[in-house]
């Protein structure tokens, strides 16, 4: 087995563009699985889910709006390039979340499968975005900032924040749905915690 170099390198514009498209598509597909079985998740996606269930407003519109206040923090802490890629990812995610139900439909899906497969897909998508210095906005920006400034692992921090959101969610959804959601979030955060560690992958 060869030695993996930690030397930093720069992604090209094309590499960043395909990463934003691929990573966001993975996340959108995972979210579609969650939504199909009535699950929730954490982060700004989870907040958008709750507002969508409570108000009936389009999920994509809510997700886009919730992220607007975080762009200033992204610019101040992470730079212009990170912010622009994040805006692109959030906008694409908002669009895909509304378009996918018309493109992909599930006639039958096992809830446990949706939780695990959806969680892993979301985690893989976020990992792709993180490695290209992008995110899906909101709490992802805070998590990445804490990892860069404090060395705290993104997966663990995301898990803590997401758990807090699910606890609040008990006020509006059933404990059974929260239970399945926890399984999905565990799969998602395991993918991040294992694969996204400071110093393991140095790219900008």
Image (cartoon, grey):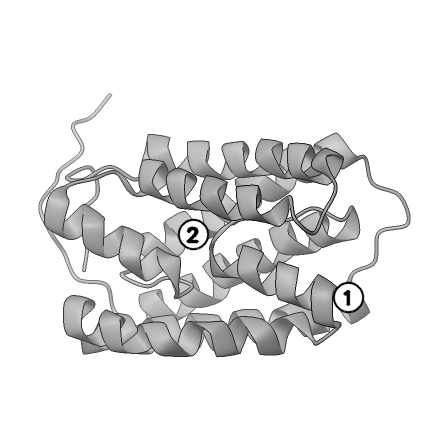
Image quadrant occupied by the C terminus: bottom left
Q: Which residue is mark 2?
A: 126
Q: Nearer the viewer, residue 104 or 169?
A: 169
Residue at the front extreme of this rendering: 171
Mark sitting on residue 101: 1
* Residue occupying image coordinates x 21% and y 56%: 145
Relative horizontal placement of residue 68, taking residue 45 as reference (left or right): left
Q: Nearer the viewer, residue 127 or 10?
A: 127
204 versus 147 height, above or below: below
Mark sitting on residue 60: none
Relative horizontal placement of residue 34, taking residue 189 as reference (left or right): right
* Residue occupying image coordinates x 78% and y 46%: 37
**10 Å neighbourhood of mark 1: few (<14), some, or many (≥20)?**
few
* Residue occupying image coordinates x 72% and y 72%: 55
Image spot of residue 123 (x, y percent): 47, 44
**10 Å neighbourhood of mark 2: few (<14), some, or many (≥20)?**
many
Residue at the top extreme of this rendering: 1
Image spot of residue 62 (x, y percent): 58, 74
Using the rendered image of the protein, determine whether residue 179 is visible from the camera's viewpoint.
Answer: yes
Quadrant of res 193: top left
Element on which disc 1 rests? helix
């Amino acid at each position: 087995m060869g030695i993996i170099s930690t030397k930093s390198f720069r992604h090209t514009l094309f590499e960043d563009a395909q990463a934003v498209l691929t990573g966001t598509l993975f996340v959108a597909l995972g979210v579609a699985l969650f939504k199909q079985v009535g699950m929730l998740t954490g982060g700004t996606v989870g907040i958008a889910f709750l507002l969508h269930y409570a108000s009936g407003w389009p999920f994509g519109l809510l997700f886009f709006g919730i992220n607007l206040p975080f762009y200033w923090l992204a610019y101040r802490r992470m730079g212009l390039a990170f912010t622009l890629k994040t805006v692109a990812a959030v906008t694409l995610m908002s669009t895909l979340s509304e378009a996918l139900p018309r493109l992909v439909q599930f006639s039958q899906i096992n809830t446990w499968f949706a939780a695990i497969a959806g969680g892993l897909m979301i985690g893989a998508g976020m990992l792709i975005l993180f490695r290209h210095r992008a995110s899906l906005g909101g709490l992802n920006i805070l998590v990445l900032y804490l990892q860069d400034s404090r060395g705290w692992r993104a997966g663990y921090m995301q898990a803590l924040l997401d758990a807090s959101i699910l606890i609040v969610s008990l006020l509006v959804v059933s404990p059974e749905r929260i239970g399945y959601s926890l399984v999905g979030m565990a799969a998602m955060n395991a993918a991040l915690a294992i694969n996204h560690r400071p110093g393991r992958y140095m790219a900008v």
